[in-house]
């Protein structure tokens, strides 16, 4: 499976993916301090609150997942290289599983790196231009590491929300990206829905898991070129 | 003789349309088999099913004597193919595309890849991106990809598409060399009979998704018959006179006004004299030989209007 995941990476226009990813990282590095300084100063009352704010900001990586669904599934259907892959001595289920695991690994890794970079940049910026009250404690660092791991897992699963319906069934780029944007933004609008943001995140994660499972289970039927 | 491909009742339906119906195809080891049919007849659909690109609606496929389906795709390690338009990862180089292909097949031989590129005369462009290739170059690269992992069976859909006359001859020669020297079995498709005639051993005729005939080329050649073809100012009256005056009944009317006489009891001179005596203007008369083209035309369109 690792071999097939590696081959999925080699099929991509890797330079474009690196450029896209770098842009995400740069934006994510400065968003927490920007929000605390300009939009939501109440999140600067402690590092605990700043960590909570950052965990929602990092949901932006879901969009990277949408972009990968576009490259790995939709584009390959459109340029017919998916049909080419169907002619190789591996089952469609294995092929789709490799593609999904590749996207999952890439999104998870991107999320972890983004958490580390944004954590470091926020800390360094705060040293020179204090925005967050109080010192950074060991408990804050441990909390950040825990949030980073659990959030990255959730982001990875949520990034698959558009896969089944828009990626494999409809094979449509715009709805896929719109769905990804919706998924990453929905927790921020949870107050309008009168639910806790974490409830929205949990529901999205369930939807992502269902979409992911449906994509693998129906690979032979819906995967048809 | 070993059967390399055997299909039983192979059928493909899509959106209430039948693309291929009840195909019983037999391809034997070491032969070059051609699927002949008009554009849209169903040749590509059949080939796609044979390499797992599309799933049959019903029927069975056996490759190398073993049942082929979604769960036995490992058989494809022994098959090379180029179906429809040559598709590549365009942002990758020719070499990267072939390496990727070989990894899926579990074939690792850098020299083998270079040799395949050499065979299709693409040497020296290994590191050029495919998006910079012309259609002819892509077709050659597709052929290199089909043969690079040394398959036992190569399936090529319209292999000379996009090639210039020299390229067509090169590919034809290459197919013959691979077949004769390496014993590779080929399944080719084309809508051009002249192209098929020069390489294939057997032909399967596809018409509206059905395999209507499988025949050895040698067999058809043996059936070649001579006939006299004539063009007159009044075709209907000519037919009447030929029957009435000379007792000829084995003839047919083709293309509306041309008459083909298969009963060669009378010479061209005798026929000409009789028609002139009855004031029929004779525009053309000549002795001809029925070609493969006639055979297949007759097979697909059901022949002329008068026998």
Image (cartoon, coloured by chain):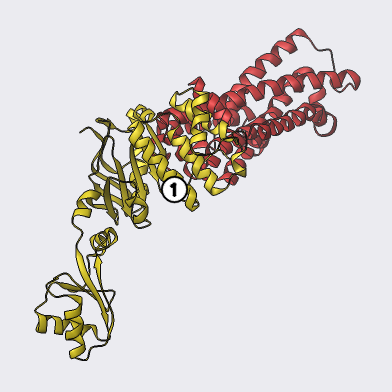
Chain colours: A red, B yellow
Q: Position of residue A19 (x, y in %)?
A: 71, 33
Q: Tag 1, which secondary structure?
A: helix
Task: Kindly identify the residue that appears in the image at 84 percent across and 12 percent down.
Answer: A135
- In the picture shown, does residue B245 fall above or below A52? below
Q: Identify the chain of the residue marked 1, using the numbered disc in the image.
A: B
**Is the residue marked by circle 1 packed among few (<14), some (14-19), or many (20+) residues within 10 Å?**
some
| Residue holding disc 1 | B169
Residue B181 pos. (x, y %): 35, 33
| Residue B79, quarter of the rendered image | top left
- As displayed, is residue A127 above or below residue B153? above
Q: Residue at x 75, y 21 (%)?
A: A117
B100 on left or right of A132: left
Residue A149's image quarter?
Answer: top right
Q: Is residue A150 left or right of residue A100?
A: right
Task: Give residue B43's position: percent from left, percent from top.
Answer: 34, 50
Quadrant assignment, res B16: bottom left
């Amino acid at each position: 499976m690792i071999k097939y995941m590696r081959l999925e990476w080699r099929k991509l226009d890797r330079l474009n993916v690196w450029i896209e990813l770098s842009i995400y990282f740069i934006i994510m590095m400065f968003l927490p301090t920007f929000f605390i300084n300009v939009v939501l100063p109440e999140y600067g009352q402690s590092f605990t609150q700043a960590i909570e704010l950052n965990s929602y900001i990092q949901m932006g990586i879901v969009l990277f997942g949408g972009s990968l669904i576009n490259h790995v599934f939709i584009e390959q259907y459109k340029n017919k290289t998916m049909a080419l892959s169907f002619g190789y001595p591996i089952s469609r289920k294995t092929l789709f599983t490799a593609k999904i695991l590749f996207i999952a690994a890439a999104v998870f890794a991107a999320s972890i790196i983004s958490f580390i970079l944004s954590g470091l940049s926020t800390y360094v910026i705060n040293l020179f231009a204090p925005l967050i009250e109080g010192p950074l404690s060991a408990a804050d660092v441990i909390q950040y590491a825990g949030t980073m791991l659990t959030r990255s897992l959730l982001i990875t699963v949520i990034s698959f929300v558009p896969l089944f319906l828009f990626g494999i069934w409809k094979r449509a780029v715009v709805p896929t990206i719109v769905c990804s944007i919706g998924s990453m933004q929905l927790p921020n609008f949870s107050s309008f829905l009168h639910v806790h943001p974490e409830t929205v995140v949990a529901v999205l994660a369930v939807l992502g898991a269902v979409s992911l499972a449906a994509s693998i289970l129906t690979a032979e039927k819906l995967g048809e070129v | 003789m070993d059967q390399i491909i055997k299909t039983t009742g192979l059928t493909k339906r899509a959106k209430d349309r039948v693309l291929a119906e009840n195909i019983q195809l037999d391809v034997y080891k070491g032969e070059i088999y051609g699927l002949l049919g008009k554009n849209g007849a169903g040749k590509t659909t059949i080939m796609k099913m044979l390499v797992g690109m599309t799933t049959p609606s019903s029927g069975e496929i056996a490759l190398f004597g073993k049942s082929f389906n979604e769960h036995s795709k490992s058989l494809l390690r022994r098959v090379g193919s180029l179906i429809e338009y040559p598709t590549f990862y365009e942002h990758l180089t020719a070499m990267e595309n072939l390496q990727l292909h070989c990894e899926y097949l579990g074939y690792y031989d850098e020299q083998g890849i270079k040799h395949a590129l050499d065979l299709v005369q693409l040497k020296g462009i290994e590191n050029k991106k495919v998006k910079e290739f012309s259609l002819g170059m892509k077709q050659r690269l597709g052929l290199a990809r089909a043969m690079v992992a040394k398959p036992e069976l190569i399936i090529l859909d319209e292999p000379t598409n996009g090639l210039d006359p020299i390229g067509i001859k090169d590919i034809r020669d290459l197919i013959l060399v691979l077949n004769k020297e390496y014993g590779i079995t080929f399944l080719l498709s084309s809508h051009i009979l002249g192209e098929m005639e020069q390489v294939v051993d057997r032909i399967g005729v596809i018409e509206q998704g059905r395999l209507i005939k499988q025949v050895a080329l040698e067999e058809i050649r043996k059936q070649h018959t001579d006939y006299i073809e004539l063009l007159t100012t009044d075709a209907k009256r000519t037919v009447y006179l030929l029957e009435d005056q000379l007792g000829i009944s084995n003839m047919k009317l083709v293309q509306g006004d041309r008459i083909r006489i298969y009963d060669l009891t009378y010479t061209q001179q005798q026929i000409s004299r009789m028609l002139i005596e009855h004031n029929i203007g004779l525009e053309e008369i000549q002795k001809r030989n029925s070609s493969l083209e006639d055979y297949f035309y007759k097979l697909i369109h059901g022949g002329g209007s008068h026998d």
